[in-house]
Amino acid sequence: MQLTAHIIDDEFHGRESLKKLIEDYCPHVKIIHLSAHVNEAVENIRKQATDIIFLDIEMPQHNGFKLFEFADLSSSNVIFTTAYDEYALKAFKYSAVHYLLKPIAIDDLKDAVDRVSKKTIVPKEEKETYKVLQENISEVTTLTLPSRSGKIFLKINKIEFLNADNNYTKFYTTDGKIILVSKSMKEYNLLLDQPGFFKTHRSYIVNLNCIKEYVNGRTGTIITNNNFKIPLVERRKEAFFKRFSKE
């Protein structure tokens, strides 16, 4: 299937090098527009929308996020191109958006194009996703979760604990909801590797701020605020008490 694309980057080399990579390794993608800044991009989008937008964030005058305010992107999949540091990359992962890290690797480019070409755009969800990303760039506060009905935007401080269920993950929230996500807990273990969360067992990650009680035993038991019982295996006890004492 032939796709059209728009590259937005304030650096001439960035635009041209990405264009060359796409021409060489994604021949089914035709570059329609090259824009050096947001205002130029808006004009080009008004002339002709494209299937994919490759969007740099850090640009003079207006950063890439302003594009969502100035233009209708409801028919385009956005792939962010960025040279951001590790912290900001975590924000991209939390927000579940497509991104390419500069300098762009060929395999990453092909994979990103393949994924967005199979994706159905839901404008309302996309708008909220990019809003969450913009917030997460400043301070990671929200996790974007895929569900059967669409995307769920869950505040991190509303997570009580996670439970692995084969290749799925169940999120238990502080208000008593259970969200089933079709991704393994391994992925969320990496995302929630931060002071407020602790992996107590191979199948559980708990929010340390949601613990009401601890019951000792060979396998300890953590009681959450909503009275769920979470196992704490022996080999994790020492690390747990060190971490918990700091919260």
Image: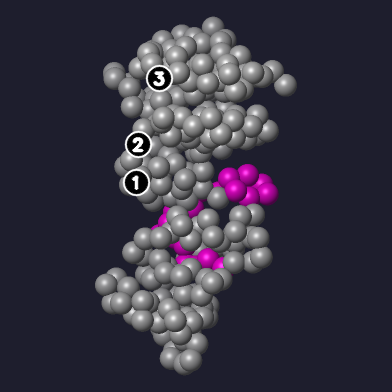
Q: Secondary structure at mark 3?
A: helix
Reading the chain from its start, which is encountered first: label 3 or label 2? 3
Residue 162: give its label: none
Residue 87: give its label: 1
Which x, y percent locates residue 194?
37, 60
Residue name at image x 56 percent, y 10 percent? 32
Which x, y percent locates residue 189?
48, 61
The amino acid at mark 1 is: Tyr
Q: Main secondary structure of the magenta part?
A: strand
Near-viewer residue (12 or 207)? 12
Near-viewer residue (183 or 222)? 183
In magenta stretch: residue 152: yes
> In this image, 91 relative to 5: left or right?
left
Residue 84: give its label: 2
Reading the chain from its start, which is encountered first: label 1 or label 3? 3
Q: Judge depth for marks 3 and 2 and give the one in front.
A: 3
In magenta stretch: residue 192: no
Which x, y percent locates residue 120?
66, 33
Q: Is residue 72 visible?
A: no
Q: Judge depth for marks 1 and 3 and give the one in front.
A: 3
The amino acid at mark 2 is: Tyr
Write down the region rendered in magenta: 146-163
Near-viewer residue (147 or 193)? 193
The amino acid at mark 3 is: Gly
Establish if 245 lies above or below 47. below
Establish if 64 lies above or below 187. above
Mark 2 and 1 residues: CB-CB less than 8 Å, in contact?
yes
Which x, y percent locates residue 208?
38, 71
Q: Identify the image quadrant of the N terminus.
A: top right
